[in-house]
Amino acid sequence: MFGISEIAILLIVVILLLGAKKLPDLARSMGKSARILKSEAAAMKAGPTPPPTVEGPTVITGTVHPAPGDTTRPPAGPSGPDAPRA
């Protein structure tokens, strides 16, 4: 793939572009990224975790009574997302 001379040229170019001061920080962040990737890959191989059990919404049925002094009237017939459309 790459020979030693090509790798050396790439390394010299990287040192010139980034500077010698930033190379340790770059290597440190690459190491952290590799560790995170490795741990995530191990977690994926371990299998999926079961999703937390969440109860569905509670449906309350009943009649809606207007408040005293309320002058608005409820619509005639059923309404809502389950009501038949015209």
Image (cartoon, helix red, strand yellow):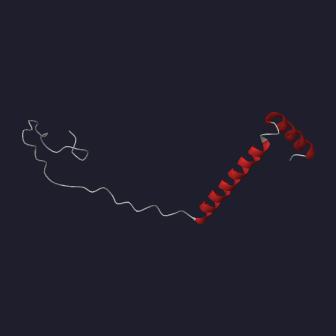
Answer above or below: position of 56 versus 17.
Answer: below
User: Considering depth in this image, is 69 or 45 the residue closer to the camera?
Assistant: 69
Residue at point 60% right, 65% down?
A: 46
Residue furthest toward the top? 17
Quadrant of the rendered structure where residue 44 is? bottom right
User: Considering depth in this image, is 31 or 71 the residue closer to the camera?
Assistant: 31
Q: Is residue 6 left or right of residue 75?
A: right
Q: Is residue 41 left or right of residue 68?
A: right
Answer above or below: position of 55 versus 7.
Answer: below
Residue at point 87% right, 46% down?
A: 2
Looking at the rendered structure, the number of numbered marks drawn on it comes to: 0
Q: Position of residue 37 (x, y in %)?
A: 66, 54
Q: Is residue 52 left or right of residue 49?
A: left
Give the position of the C terminus as an image quadrant.
top left
Residue at point 13% right, 51% down?
A: 63
Quadrant of the rendered structure where residue 6 is? top right
Residue furthest toward the left? 69
Answer above or below: position of 72 versus 3.
Answer: above
Residue at point 87% right, 44% down?
A: 7
Residue furthest toward the bottom? 46
Residue furthest toward the front? 21
Q: Position of residue 56 (x, y in %)?
A: 33, 58
User: Considering depth in this image, is 42 or 15 the residue closer to the camera?
Assistant: 15
Q: Position of residue 53 (x, y in %)?
A: 40, 62
Q: Position of residue 55 (x, y in %)?
A: 34, 60
